[in-house]
Image (cartoon, grey):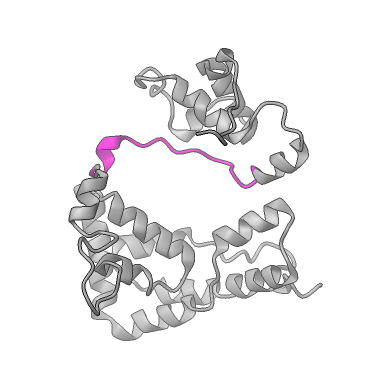
């Protein structure tokens, strides 16, 4: 690759102790055990992965250090997961199962798979990303699978509730994207208005879930924060 740019990093950057220090600084903690990482460091066959991750998060001596720190401001936690938590699908399997693209293009048919077509019907961008992640990395934990199916069954059998939730979610913009733009300091007035309109949907959405018996929907109701304790939340994007 003639036009490629090679960036060399000293070997000590990939040491585990340096990687852990960078992660502690990033998350503002004295230990990583609170993230469920206790006991997992020795299990990793390649400790350099820790340092590689840190090197990607925070390159050494960036020219625009202040801007780069802001770019990582919204990254305040890390989660450990095992490969055994989900079914590992290689590229060939994903292609043969048509999880994303059809195996063979068909005349007059859409050029995406049924799964991808379903993603396009999501009411919000972050929901579409989550569903895509679930499709390409299928869960193998029986309790988790049953919890998801229970929630799906409940929403499927309650048409009015399902449509009310869909209608409410239609007004929610991509909060992950908006949060990133706000953290970077590049949010436009339109972004802030979109953020305000999205946050005002939370109380009603939470109300829809308050009587849902399924464990997953009940847990979502309990975890959902209406942000009522944040002064001026109802005036986001209005200049108030």
Outermost residue toward the right in this view: 240
Residue 76 quadrant: top right
Outermost residue toward the front in this view: 2
| Tag count | 0
Q: Position of residue 122 (x, y in %)?
A: 40, 72
Outermost residue toward the bottom in this view: 160
Q: Which residue is located at x 29 percent, y 49 percent?
A: 137
* Front-lying residue, 130 or 202: 130
Residue 208 in view, yes or no: yes
Q: Is residue 66 magenta?
A: no
In this picture, residue 142 sits left or right of residue 62? left
Q: Which residue is located at x 29 percent, y 75 percent?
A: 110
* Front-lying residue, 133 or 197: 133
Q: Position of residue 82 (x, y in %)?
A: 32, 35
Residue 5 quadrant: top right
Q: Which residue is located at x 22 percent, y 71 percent?
A: 153
Q: Quadrant of the C terminus?
A: bottom right
In this picture, residue 46 sits left or right of residue 178? left
Q: Is residue 77 magenta?
A: yes
The rendered magenta stretch, by its main secondary structure, is classed as loop
What residue range appears in magenta?
72-87
Q: Which residue is located at x 57 percent, y 66 percent?
A: 226
């Amino acid at each position: 690759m003639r036009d490629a740019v090679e960036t060399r990093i000293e070997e000590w950057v990939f040491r585990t102790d340096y990687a852990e220090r960078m992660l502690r600084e990033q998350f503002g903690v004295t230990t990583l055990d609170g993230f469920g990482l206790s006991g997992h460091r020795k299990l990793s066959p390649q400790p350099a992965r820790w340092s590689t991750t840190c090197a990607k998060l925070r390159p050494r001596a960036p020219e625009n250090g202040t801007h780069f720190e802001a770019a990582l401001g919204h990254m305040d936690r890390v989660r450990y997961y095992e490969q055994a938590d989900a079914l590992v699908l290689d590229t060939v399997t994903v292609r043969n199962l048509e999880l994303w693209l059809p195996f063979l293009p068909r005349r007059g048919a859409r050029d995406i798979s049924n799964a991808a077509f379903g993603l396009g019907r999501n009411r919000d961008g972050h929901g579409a990303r989550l569903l895509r992640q679930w499709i390409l990395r299928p869960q193998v934990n029986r309790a988790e699978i049953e919890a998801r199916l229970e929630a799906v069954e409940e929403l499927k059998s309650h048409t009015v509730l399902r449509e009310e939730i869909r209608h409410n979610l239609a007004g929610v913009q991509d909060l992950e994207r908006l949060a990133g733009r706000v953290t970077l300091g590049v949010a436009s007035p339109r972004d802030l208005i979109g953020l305000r309109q999205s946050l005002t949907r939370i109380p009603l959405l939470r109300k829809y879930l308050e009587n849902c018996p399924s464990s997953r929907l009940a847990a979502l109701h309990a975890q959902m924060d209406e942000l009522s304790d944040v002064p001026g939340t109802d005036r986001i994007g209005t200049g108030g």
